[in-house]
Amino acid sequence: MRKNSSATMLACSLLFLSACGRAPAPDAADATLTPKAATERLLDQAFVLDQMDKKTQAIAAFDAAITSKGFDQLPKVRRVIALEAEGEAEETLQEHANAHALFVRASELDPSNQRAWMDRLESSWETRDYVDNVRCITRIARSWPEVTKEIPGQSIWMVQQELPDEQRSEALRFEMFDALYDAHWRGIAINPSAIWRDLSRMLLARNHLAKAKQVAAEIDRARVVLSMRVDKRFDAITRDNPAFDVDRVATAYLEKTRAKVTRQPDNLQARTEEISALMDLRRYEEALQTADALIATVEDGSGPKRFKDFDEHYNWLLNLREHALVRLGRFDEAAAELERAAGQLERGHVNVSQVINLGELYDELGRPADALAIVSKVGDASPFGKMQLAFVQLWASIQLQKTGAVAQQMDYLRAHRADAMSTWTDALVLTGNDDEAAAEIIARLNNEHFRSQALEDVQDSAPIRRLPLASALDARWHRVYARADVREAIQKVGRMESFRIDPSAF
């Protein structure tokens, strides 16, 4: 439930007056009432009904008041309170679209009303109105920068990824990222380096070199630095700049995570970031030992007491241990560990991320039936998650020679490719559609928003242990990258280099 609002406080006042013997106002239909007075009467009734938790009746009364002739004659603050109150009642009944429309009206009626914008932000997420969600974040960051710390970094990253692929989206991203940077937002539960990379790119396109350099100086993830080094758009920042040495950045990030662990011993996310940093540096044995030592400290069930974010990050700790085992060639142990991670509930529901990861590992192990069985447990997932799920099912169906299922999954992946472009090209390569895969890679290279990821994907990284089926897929990828048309497209916008960090993001 939401916190008490001004509307609720007003309703309490009305009840207090009634209890003190105050005579009720005449019926709203009374012909002697002015339109304004009739509207006030309807609102009084609505607030009391709302306080009595009669939400359906309250909403009807609010609707009658808000659509009445006298509503526009009320003071602005009274109208905003009414719109907010009905919006909150609609939210209680899970009527998110109705609530969003009311919060939009409230925020536009009083642009300085912080609560109205925060409610609009929440309801835009519920209705998946990603364009409006970005607008809300931008307004909040500009008007109330201190509030941005309450906005999870993961939601910011996800919502901008969901914007339609059009020029307007780039402008919306720029306004949001620039507002967040000026508000000194630094991310919650997500490293903002990729966001700062995109902001610095857009600043460069606007000839704001000084600020672009300032923003780029905040980037501390090696993989993001890598994507900038190989992208000609960033040459004014990265060329001959030792701060963009990938190995140096990876080492510095490890030390940064260790300092964070020391400062925040009850933060499990900081521990997982340390292990991820070790994995990037290919220090797999050390990563495994660190994970093992950490897991041992909570085997007695003390995890929730030791770590404030245990429920959110313990499954990722297990997932990281599985990654380390895979890199060390201990594949059966890795499967067992990921099975344990997949069994951890996430907010009381199936752990979607680890279940899908386990399905892909089963595919790599040549266990397609197990892959299909485990991912069948997945219910709802994000658009990105649904693409990963479809890829797992596609790979399993290929191994089981289920032609109809292969076609079905390819149809889904094609129709929703904008939700995960890399996954779609993975599917094309997996099914031997080299010409279409090459065309997709070239299209991504020519797209301002997708180019950074596309260039990162084509780089040569350190060799790692792979299962035979994964090695075969990797070889198919290299075959596509070696095509003359793909190489030519890469050279126009970037370059190919070799790097020593692990090729996967952890």
Image (cartoon, grey):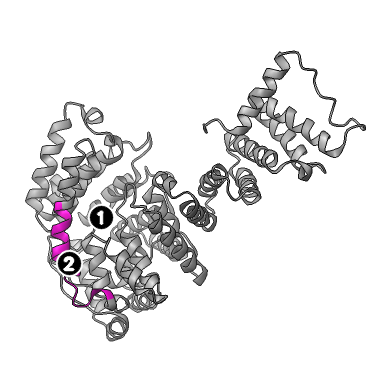
Q: Is residue 411 magenta?
A: no
Residue lying at 17% horizontally and 26% vertically, measured from the top left: 300
Residue 412 position within the rendered picture, expressed as x and y whole percent measured from the top left: 45, 61
Considering only vertical position in the picture, is 427 above or below 365? below
SS at mark 2 in the image: helix
Q: Position of residue 103 (x, y in %)?
A: 61, 45
Residue 198 coordinates in the image, percent (x, y):
36, 66
Task: Say what secondary structure mark 1 lies in.
Answer: helix
Q: Is residue 242 magenta?
A: yes
The mark found on residue 363 in the picture is 1
| Residue that numbered label 2 is attached to | 246
Magenta-highlighted stretch: main secondary structure? Answer: helix
Residue range highlighted in magenta:
237-255
Give the class, few, some or many, for how many residues have Cα within 10 Å of label 1's Cα (few <14, many ≥20): many
Query: Crowding at label 2, few (<14), some or many (≥20) Cα neighbours within 10 Å?
Result: many
The front one of 36 and 360 is: 36
Residue that lies at the very extreme toward the right in this rendered image: 31
What residue lies at 68% left-to-right and 38% top-to-bottom? 82
Amino acid type assigned to the residue bearing label 2 in the image:
Val
The amino acid type of the residue labelled 1 equals Asp
The residue closer to the viewer here, 171 or 427, is 171
Residue placed at 35% from the left, 45% from the top? Answer: 352
Tell me: residue 247, above or below residue 20. below
Q: Quadrant of residue 470?
A: bottom left
